[in-house]
Amino acid sequence: MRPAITDELTDYRRIPRTLSHVYYDPLTPENEAEVEKIFKALTSDPSDPVQHNRKLTTWGRTITVPESSSTVAKFRFDELCGMPLSAADYLEIVKNFKTIFILDVPKMGMSQKDKARRFITFIDAMYSYSRASVLTAPSHPYLPSAMSATAFRPALLIVDVQEDFCPRNGALAVPDGRAVVPVINDLLALPFVLKIATKDHHPPNHVSFASNHGPDAEPYTSVTTITNPANARETYETQLWPDHCVAGTPGNALVRELAADRLDRVVLKGTDPRVEMYSAFRSPLRDPPLASAVSELADLLRGHEVTEVFVTGLAGDYCVFHSAVDCAEEGWKTYVVEEATRSVGGQEGWEKAAAQLKEKGVGIVRADGEEVGRVRELSGSA
Ligand code: VGL
Ligand code: ZN
C-alpha cells in the first residue's frame, strides 16, 4: 500500500515499529467502523467517559479537543492541521493524551504545504513523547516495513571506535576493544548504502567526568543526576567515568587502524557538557528533548532511505546498546554484529546487554551470518 501522503513529505520512517494503534488507509466505510471500534474499546472505562470539546489551555491559548477521554483523543485531520496551531499547541495535545486518533488524513501535495508541515510537526511531537497512533492499512500495521517490502538498504553504524576506548592506553579502555577493528574494516568493504562512524566528543567540563564532581567522586562507581535544562522535573541518574574522548585530544581520534577512508560521515555525540549521551541518536531527555543532544543521525538514515541498520563498535553495554535501542525504536530493523563489539563489562556485560537488546527487537547477528550475507550479495553499485 501507499502512504496517504506524497513522497516528498513522507516522514513515516520516524514512527516506531512498536506503535500499536494504527490509522487505516484507504478510508473505506469498513475501516472507519473499525477505527471507531478501537476508539470505543480504548475509551470504554465508565469512570472516564468521552467528553466532547474538552478545552486545553497553553500559553494563554485554548485548544479544543473534539472527542477525548483522559488518555485518548480523536481529531479529524482538519481539526488538527487545518487551522493555525503551533508546535507548542501540538506538544500540549500530545502531552495530555497517550493515544491520538487522526481521521481523514488526506493526500497532501505541495499545494497543501501548511497542512503537511503542521501534520509533520504533530507527528514529531508524538514521536518525542513516544505516543501511540497513526497510519496504515489493517494488513500492514507497520508502515515502514510495508513501504520497504522489497527495498533492502542497509547502513553500517560504527559507534565510538576511538583511541580512548581501546587498550592499552585508552582512558576508558574497553577490554579487548581493539579487536573490533579488523571485523569492522571487513564490513566497511561491503556495499552498505551508508557507512557512518560516531565519535564520543566531550568538552573538558563534561558532566560524565568524575573529575568534574569533586574529590569524592570515583570513576566507574559514583553517579550524578542530570537535569533537563528546560525542565527541572525531568532528571536521570548517570554513571561517572574517567575523562575520555575530550575534543582535540589524541584519545578522541578514531582508532588509527580503522579504514576511515571508507566512511561516508562522522557524527559527533556527547558534545553538550550538561548531559550524558550514550545513544548516537539523542540523550534520554524527552520532556522536551534537548536540541543540542539530538544528533543528525536519524535524518541521515532517513535521507538515504535506509531500511536496516547494522550496529558495531564500543561499548556493547553502553553506547552500542543505547544506539541500537533507539534505532529500533525509530523504526529501523536493527542488528548488532556480535564480533564487532566489546563491552565495558566484558563477556558478561555483553550477554546482559544482548539479552535486553533481543527483548527490544534488536537482532544479534554474526559477521558471517545470513543478515550480513544479504549485504555481501548486494551489487557494489547499491
Ligand atoms: C561510552 C561510557 C562513556 C561508550 C561513552 O562509547 O560506550 N561509554 N562514554
Ligand atoms: Zn563518553
Image (spheres, grey):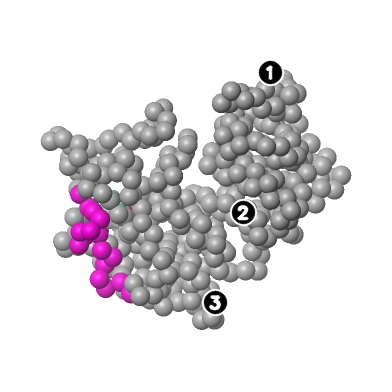
Kind of residue at badge 3: Ala
Residue at 73 percent across and 59 percent down: it is 2
Which quarter of the rendered picture does the C terminus lie within? bottom right
Give me the disc on residue 266.
none
Q: Nearer the viewer, residue 304 or 365?
A: 304
Which label's residue is closer to the chain start, 3 or 2?
2
What is the crowding at mark 3: few (fewer than 14 residues within 10 Å), some, or many (at least 20)?
A: few
Q: Which residue is mark 2?
A: 11
Specify the quadrant of the image occupied by residue 347: bottom left
Q: Secondary structure at mark 1?
A: loop
Q: Is residue 332 left or right of residue 162?
A: right
Q: Is residue 22 left or right of residue 268?
A: right
Q: Nearer the viewer, mark 1 or mark 2?
A: 2
> Does the stretch in magenta take in 247?
yes
> Does the stretch in magenta take in 76?
no
Q: Which residue is mark 1?
A: 47
Whether label 3 lies within 8 Å of ligand 1 gets the answer: no
Which label's residue is closer to the chain start, 1 or 2?
2
Q: Is residue 80 shown above or below 331?
A: above
Kind of residue at badge 1: Ser
Task: Residue 379: give x, y in percent of width and height.
Answer: 54, 81
Question: In whole angstroms, how far apart are the C-alphas of marks 3 and 2?
Answer: 23 Å
Which label's residue is closer to the chain start, 1 or 3?
1
Q: Nearer the viewer, mark 1 or mark 3?
A: 3
Kind of residue at badge 2: Asp
Q: Nearer the viewer, mark 3 or mark 2?
A: 2
Q: Which residue is mark 3?
A: 382
Whether label 1 lies within 8 Å of ligand 1 gets the answer: no
Specify the quadrant of the image occupied by residue 143: bottom right
